[in-house]
Image: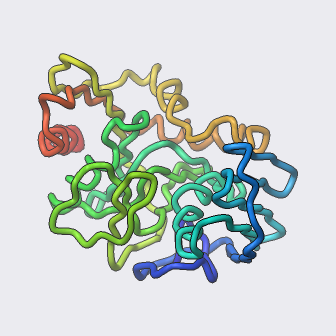
Amino acid sequence: MYAYGADLTDVPGVWPPTTGASVHDEVRWVDTENGVPLSPEVWSNEDGSGFTVGWGGYAEYCVSKHDSVTTVDVQRGSISLEEAGMAFVLSVLPLALPLFDLEPLHGSAVAIPDRGAMLILGDSESGKSTTAFELTKRGLRFVSDDACALDREAALWPGPPLLASRSQTDDHPVLAHYDRKTVIAFDDHDTSPLPVVGAVVLEPGPSFDLEVEEVPMRSRVSLLLRYVRAPWFMGGLREPLQFAAVAGAAVKPLGTVRFDKNRHAPSAVAAAVLEAMA
């Protein structure tokens, strides 16, 4: 499977096919069955070549890069090999993106035919994945979920062909359940990089009317920087890359979408995003 421009070698699990890969890194999986301590609940540390992150009693992932090969040394606790693979793809791999010279923004993305990628950014539980899924039902192609990986030219490198949502995903095959989310898969996923043509930021709030507002050019960089994913992680490595990626995305159209989750259905929010895209 290819994701974020990397060839994920031997990552356990049954993954959908991917096409059109532009591979610039290889990620190799090494699995052990040693026990993982029950505490602390979460830990992480970094060095010059990578990082280690772990969850008490669950798993620990040691990610290190040498030249164009990234090795993932995994110690499992109470989870299966397949669960460890899913956790790596959805939770650990996005943390490793700066090792591939990619800057992650917290959001999902869809492709507008013959144009490029539209980013759907927002805070946790703002409806990014749900909105992206609604847009795929309206003919747009799924590109990425949870992490929008931008290079120095602000091109988007598609993630894995997986979308994890807390909302119902009727009429679509379910691949797995992870972190209280339903994971669905997309076949024939094209991992070729795409130009970013614009972005929207979802801002749900009580008593909000559904409206889309264009963000002034002077405010775009600061707004996009709010949605950098895990900004504390590998900060020294990311600063020059982060500025280049965000500055490149900021020259594209950017809007905020305000809505009330209790009053506006995901389909209505998706329709507002489509209108903004137009």
Q: Where 270 falls versus 30 (above or below)?
A: above
Residue 196 at what x, y percent from top left? 42, 50
Residue 54, compared with residue 23, is above or below; it is above
Query: How many numbered circles does the render carry?
Result: 0
Reply above or below: 80 against 240: below
3 vs 87, nearest the viewer:
87
Q: In this view, does 125 lie to the left or right of 210?
A: right
To which quarter of the image does residue 136 belong? Answer: bottom left
Name of the residue lying farthest toward the top: 207
Residue located 40% across and 39% down the image: 121
Residue 213 sits in which quadrant?
top left
Look at 27% across and 22% down and name the residue there: 205
Looking at the image, residue 276 lies above or below residue 213: below
| Residue drawn where x is 26% and y is 30% of the image | 257
Say which of 149 and 155 sits in front: 149
Q: In which quarter of the image is the C terminus?
A: top left
Residue 233: image quadrant is: top right
Image spot of residue 7 (x, y percent): 60, 77
Task: Specify how the rendered protein is coloured.
Answer: rainbow
Q: Residue furthest right?
A: 48
Q: Toward the viewer: 30 or 200?
A: 30
- Residue positioned 27% across, 57% down in the render: 112
Would residue 77 be found to the left or right of residue 137 on screen?
right
The percent coordinates of residue 234 (x first, y second) are 74, 43
Q: Where is residue 101 in the image (x, y as percent from the top left)?
A: 68, 55
